[in-house]
Image: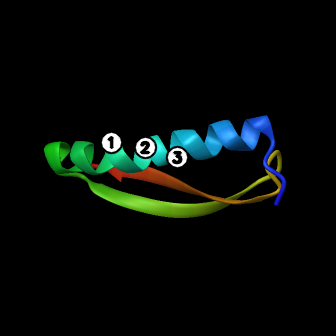
Amino acid sequence: MKLSRRSFLVSTAAAGAIRTLPTLATRTGGRRILTLVYDKSLGMMRAVERLVP
């Protein structure tokens, strides 16, 4: 797989979110809902995580 600059930035941001979101979820006491969506710009599926109080 060829990694473009945009996909590299997105994957880096996703890796950072994986580290920070669990601590935020435990503080707020909300539920996390994980949804898969198709991203046309990346040409693949990506995970979107939402916090629900």
Residue at the image point whose x is 82% and y is 50% from the top? 40
In the image, residue 25 sits, relative to residue 45, either above or below, namely: above
Q: The residue under label 2 is which amino acid type?
A: Ala
Give the label on residue 3, or none: none
Q: Position of residue 5 (x, y in %)?
A: 77, 35
Q: The residue under label 3 is which amino acid type?
A: Ala
The reply to whether discs 2 and 1 touch (Cβ–Cβ < 8 Å) is yes
Give the label on residue 20, or none: 1
Q: Residue 20 sits in which quadrant? A: top left
Q: Nearer the viewer, residue 51 or 7?
A: 7
Q: Position of residue 48 (x, y in %)?
A: 54, 53
Identify the residue at the far front of this view: 2
Residue at the image point whose x is 28% and y is 51% from the top? 22
Q: Position of residue 30 (x, y in %)?
A: 23, 52
| 10 Å crowding of disc 3: few (<14), some (14-19), many (20+) | some
Residue at disc 3, secondary structure:
helix
Q: Position of residue 16 (x, y in %)?
A: 44, 41
Q: Is residue 32 left or right of residue 4?
A: left
Give the label on residue 14, or none: 3
The reply to whether discs 3 and 2 touch (Cβ–Cβ < 8 Å) is yes
| 10 Å crowding of disc 2: few (<14), some (14-19), many (20+) | few
Residue bearing the label numbered 2: 17
Residue at the image point whose x is 15% and y is 43% from the top? 27
Q: Residue 7 sits in which quadrant? A: top right
Residue at disc 1, secondary structure:
helix
Residue at disc 2, secondary structure:
helix
